[in-house]
Amino acid sequence: MKILVTGATGFLGHHVISTLVERGVEVVATGRSLSKMKQAPWADAVTLVQMDLDQLPDSLMDQLHHPSHCVHLAWPNLPDYKSETHLNHSLPQSKNFLCKLIDQGIQKILVAGTCFEYGMQEGELSEKFPPRPDNPYGRAKNQLRLELESYLKDKDTDLQWARLFYMYGKGQNPKSLFAQLQKAIQSGCDEFDMSGGQQIRDYLPVEEVAAAIADLICHPTHTGTINVCSGENVPLLDLVKRYLENHNADIKLNLGVFPYPDWEPFKFWGAPHLLEKVRKQR
C-alpha cells in the first residue's frame, strides 16, 4: 500500500501524514510549495511531489510515483464558506484531479467532505440524513461527491467520503476560534471576545481526526459516506472553558461581542456510530 496525501502542508494534511508515517505506511505527499513540505518533521520519511492541481501532467500517476490509495484533502479558499469560488474553481479542480487518478488506475480514494453538506438541519446528524447544503462550500463538496459516485459506476476504484465536523489543534487556521484563543493565552490577555457561546458544536482534536482518516483509508473493505465526529453535543462556551482549564488560563470571556454565524445551524452534532463500528473492524 502506498498512500498519496494531497494538501500535505494544510492543517489536517500535516497530521494525517504524521499518523500514516508513524504506522509505517509508505506515503507520497503533494502540495504547491516544496519548501513548506521540506520543513515538515515527516519530510525525510515520505516522497515529496510539488504539484499545482490546476496544471496536471498527462502522466499523473507516473509523476506521483504510482500510489495505490489517495487521501484527498486539498481544497483552496477556506475558511470563506460563502465564496462562489468553491463551486466555480475548487469543485472542477478536484473533480479533474480525481478523475485522472481513477482513469490511471488508483485503487481507492478518500475525499474530505464536510458537515456543511447537511445544511441547516439540526440535532444529531446521521449519514442517513439527506444532504441539504446551504452555502457554496457545502454545495460544492456535495456536488463533487455526487459526480464522483456517478463517474465510478463502471470503474474499479473504491470511494470513501469522510464528512468532517469541527476540529482544533496545532496548525489550525489563525482566524479560527481556538487558534485565536490560544494566541490570547500565549499573549497573556486578560479578556477574550466571542459570541454568546450557546451554539452546540461537535469538536475533535485534529490528531483524532487524522487517526480516524488513517483507519478508514487503510480499512480493507469500507466504502461510502461516513461522519468523522465525536458525537458529543456540547455548547461552544463549555468547550472554550474546558480549553482554558486545560491550559491553566484565567481569561475573562466577553460573551455576545460577535454575532452567531448565519452559515450553519445553531445546534448540530454528528452521529459517530458508523465510524465507531468501522474502526473496530480494522
Image (tube, rainbow, N blue to C red):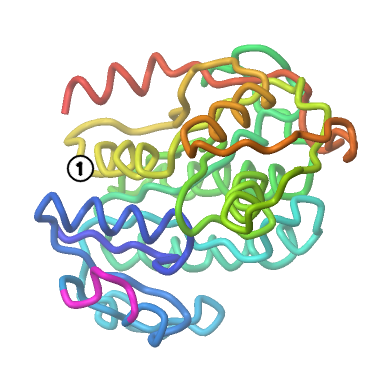
Q: Position of residue 238 (x, y in %)?
A: 63, 21
Which one is nearer the viewer's eye here, 152 or 278? 278
* Residue density around tag 1, few if under 14, some if 14–19, many if 20 or more, within 10 Å: some
Is disc 1 placed on a helix, strand or loop? loop
Q: Residue at x 60, y 20 (%)?
A: 269
Vertical position of residue 143 compared to residue 212: above or below: below
Locate residue 148 relative to residue 222 in the image: left or right. Answer: right
**Badge 1 amino acid:** Cys
Q: Quadrant of the C terminus?
A: top left
Residue 128 in view: no
Q: Which residue is drawn at 69% across and 67% down?
A: 89
Q: Where is residue 97 in the image (x, y as percent from the top left)?
A: 47, 68
Residue 43 within the segment the image draws in magenta: yes
Q: Which residue is drawn at 13% across and 56% down?
A: 25
Q: Which residue is drawn at 72% across and 16% down?
A: 122
Total numbered labels = 1
Which one is nearer the viewer's eye here, 248 or 107? 248
Q: What stretch is highlighted in magenta?
A: 39-44
Locate residue 198 relative to residue 176 in the image: left or right. Answer: right
Residue 102: quadrant of the picture: bottom left
